Amino acid sequence: MNKHLYLLVVFFLCAPLAHSEEPIDFSSDYPTMVVNEDSTITFCYCGAAKRVSVQADFLYADEDSTWYTDHSKRIKMKKLSDGCFHATTRPISPEMYTYCFRVNGKRKPDPFNPDTAWQKMHKWSVVNVGGSERADLYRTPERTGQVIHTTWLSTGERIRRRVNIYLPFGYELNIDHKYPVLYLIHGINGYEGSWSERGRAINILENLVAEGLCEPMILIMPDVNIGVHEDRPSHHTLWNNVFNYPRLCHDHEIERGLVELIQHVDTTYRVSSVHLIAGMSDGARMAANTANAMPGYFEAVGFFSPVVHKEQLPQDSAYYSIYVGKSDMFYNNGKRFHQRMVKNGTAHRYIETIGGHYWRNWRIYLSDFLRNYSK
């Protein structure tokens, strides 16, 4: 895709960002959100308001899932005799979803739901509707390890970058055991928390481990935004990425910083000889550049809805997996990259799915990548 067209698409996708978020004044003991046994969801809002609705990316059970939508549904809530606003959805397809309240036109995340995720510079509340093998991977696992929020020095950029490091359950006890490591790179609209919040990477990993479908491993989830400010959360750097996209693509300072992060991880944590890297959207380009900068280091590389070009073609023997949805705006980009790899004789897997450029697909891709990386 033309880079200017890419920026235009990102602009329109992310345009509705101006609404402020305010705290909710609840005055009732009613639960704000309940997933019912019939896969419907009941919402309740008891604060002072004239009108209340729920905004969400729900997929109803009777809807065609071929085209995934993103925060497109508005569910009006009705004020009842108890003075609170109530609404119950139709049955929801098993999946992880995000939602917020709309109170007098202003968006407000659910203050009584601690499960949240940042997207498009806003905080969303998260709800998981179980009932399928895939959706059950997103639930909170019975055993979890430790998440370390830290930084590393990117010397070329002369800045310290944020990174979330997940050490699996039992890491501190198995002192002689070394673990595989997976680097997960977010896209142009993400930050270091995206893969754990929207991507459910930790939940997916630990639930697969519990089922015997994957071995425990270390997850490295760095911030790869072009603008990093110590006094500002990195999920607020979207526009800096958009307006500096040519630099993001061509100076490769972030990828050189990722190489330094990898060297730091190798000398700090008990890492085995199995190294993996995967990126979604524009993060796939960074994953490819990093793998090419370290030939022979990575065993497997994953591209999820990739924004990659011929300059990112593999330079080593890692095993590549390309995933793309048939309604993804970068479908042609991913398919063309696959065709180039076939022409070059590069061993890889190419997987087409339904759906588009959304976290629903990227969670599916991650779970498949984890299951198949050693095959």
Image (tube, helix red, strand yellow):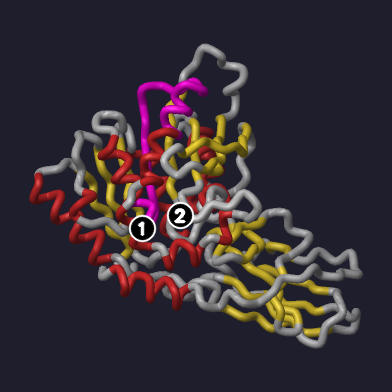
- Quarter in which the C terminus is drawn: top left
Residue in the image at 90% along x and 79% along y = 82
Q: Are marks 2 and 1 in contact (CB under 8 Å)?
A: yes
Outermost top residue = 176
Mark toward the start of the polypeptide (2 vs 1): 2
Pick the front one: 248 or 142: 248
Rendered view: 97 above or below 76:
above
Q: How many marks?
A: 2
Most foreground residue, 228 or 111: 228
Tell me how far mark 2 sits from mark 1, CA to CA: 8 Å
Q: Residue at x 54, y 52 (%)?
A: 228
Q: Quadrant of the N terminus?
A: bottom left
Q: Dot 2 corresponds to which residue?
A: 226
- In percent of the image, x 48 and y 42: which residue is there? 158
Q: Position of residue 359 (x, y in %)?
A: 47, 59
Q: Residues within 10 Å of mark 1 (few under 14, many from 20)?
A: few
> Where is 262 relative to 225, above or below?
above
* x and y, in percent, of residue 342 in the image: 12, 50
Asked whether 276 falls inside the magenta stretch, the response is yes
| Residue 210 in view, yes or no | yes
98 displayed left or right of 257: right
Q: Nearer the viewer, residue 121 or 93?
A: 121
Q: Which residues are magenta?
A: 261-284
The residue sitting at 45% across, 44% down in the picture is 157
Q: Quadrant of residue 314?
A: top left
**Magenta-span inclusion, residue 332:** no
**Mark 2 residue element:** loop
Label 1 sits on residue: 247
Quick one: SS at disc 1? helix
Q: Is residue 327 visible?
A: no
